[in-house]
Amino acid sequence: MAVLLEDIVQSVEMWLKLIKKPQPYVDPNLDPVLLVPGIAGSILTAVDDKNGKEERVWVRILGADYKFRTKLWSRFDPSTGRTVSLDEGSRIVVPEDRYGLYAIDVLDPDMIIGRDCVYYFHDMIEEMIKWGFQEGKTLFGFGYDFRQSNRLQDTMDRLAAKLESVYNASGGKKISIISHSMGGLLVKCFMGLHSDIFEKYVKNWIAIAAPFRGAPGYIASTFLNGMSFVDGWEQNFFISKWSMHQLLIECPSVYELMACPHFQWEHVPLLELWREKQDCSGYSRTILESYGPGESIEIFKQALKGNWIDYNGESIPMPFNLEILEWTKKTRKVLAEAKVPHGVKFYNIYGINLETPHSVCYGSEETPITDLEELRLYEPTYVCCDGDGTVPAESAKADGLHAEARVGVPGEHRGILCEPHVFRILKHWLKAGVPDPFYNPVNDYVILPTAFEMESHKEKGLQVTSLKEEWEIVSEDQVDLDDMTSQKPFVSSISVSQGGNKQSSRAEAHATVIVHPQNEGKQHVELNAISVSVDA
């Protein structure tokens, strides 16, 4: 009986062109890949200028908040565009171990319990090694000081040198860059400022979850409340939101993630405040004020004008930094003018299906804001849109570039880096390893198993087994499939029987296969099967 159900499943799998995956191997013919992380996605080490002693300051669990405040707190220098650590006796560097991969793999290598919360590219690195990539030969990483501007010349120089070294290490093969989150802005800045170098060394650029037009809700609340990079119980041992807040106010990179004020948003992201106002008669009433991306600047200025920190006994003002804002305007110009060079292919993967902060609201009709400097004490509420929980899909899709493909994948902003769907897409675009068992190169579609259920029970002397399995087909040829959305589901039946004898029982199995046409180049395939056997 079980054999009959297995025959049905194998028949459907053969119809979907599924094949067995062989063991991974090292493939010397692969083009090299360079992984570029987003904000807070690189290990940072403080090096003592006197004795050369190195100490990891991001990420760490033990003594995290103290080391963060003493080593990473910084001030922006408008003459250089660099944010400079307050600790004058040390400098911040990014480890280059494992060809740059160490700094972007597991952000706290010493962490044992709950280690997955500090994974960055870890799962993707392991997956790519299975495809035949090899560290130092075809797989490399580029970590950077994420406090700095995405167009800081020092970072641009480091990336140029990295591209050259990867190109040489791989025997003169052009590189596929995979960037995540803010790393996409860094790569786009480099492409805009050094298009000749980009064209010389880069073959493909794949941007994942990039906030091309900003992360409006997330960044607006960051300026007023700070942010946490760790959820759950680990927050108790990590960096406080207040400490993070004081750092980010002086980070050009964060200002470069603000909502783009000139982008044609479907709905303009707003900063909303419930405030108590007096009318001309002297009566108080509560009203909801709304501020667009440009108008919000004045609110940030007022809310942070009294913000300060104590560093080694010295009071240092930390207001909203208008000099960084001016620097950011030039960064936006670089991003707006960047184009994909001839011969380079650009791909965009963005997250969908999660509630994502778009507009931010402080106070309520019952408890209005009376003092803007107290905004930091209020918890924000959000008006959300579709996205990855951090970056709206609308922003991530609006790369402003000629793209070979743009694909929306259900997933959380950082978690998307370990999504099997993303891995299969990357594997196809990179032409890595052996043919994907869920990818049919003839019909050019990806087949993803989405559900499997199997139950078995006895009833009146009969052995009854039921099975349900589902697949999702994602096709690049979306025109014909989109036309199918108006059609009814396609239904087909399969029947298998087995005669009884002394060695085996008599059995029958019946199955129904339903193909549900959907939009966006997708089809849903559902298999329902049941088998009944009687002992001989």
Image (spheres, grey):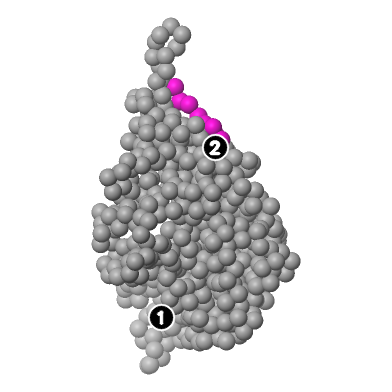
The residue tagged 1 is 2
Q: Is residue 76 above or below residue 38?
A: above
Q: Amino acid at mark 1?
A: Ala
Q: Is residue 233 left or right of residue 409?
A: left
Report the magenta residues as a range.
287-295
Front-most of residues 345 and 519: 345
Q: Residue at x 58, y 52 (%)?
A: 212
Proximity of marks 1 and 2: CB atoms separated by less than 8 Å: no
Q: Secondary structure at mark 2?
A: loop
The residue tagged 2 is 293
Q: Is residue 295 above or below residue 40?
A: above
Please identify the residue farthest to the front as the structure is shown: 50
Q: Residue at x 54, y 37 (%)?
A: 293
Quadrant of the frame with the N terminus: bottom left
Q: In x, y percent, where is residue 267?
A: 57, 38
Q: Amino acid at mark 2?
A: Pro
Q: In x, y percent, where is residue 109?
A: 33, 70
Number of numbered discs: 2
Front-most of residues 331 and 428: 331
Q: Quadrant of residue 379?
A: top left
Query: Would you say residue 303 is visible in this rendering?
Result: yes
Q: Mark 1 or mark 2: which comes first in sequence?
A: 1
Which numbered circle lies on residue 262? Answer: none
Q: Is residue 476 left or right of residue 181?
A: right
Mark 1 burial class by Cα count in 10 Å: few <14, some 14-19, many 20+? some
Q: Secondary structure at mark 1?
A: helix
Q: Residue at x 41, y 27 (%)?
A: 274
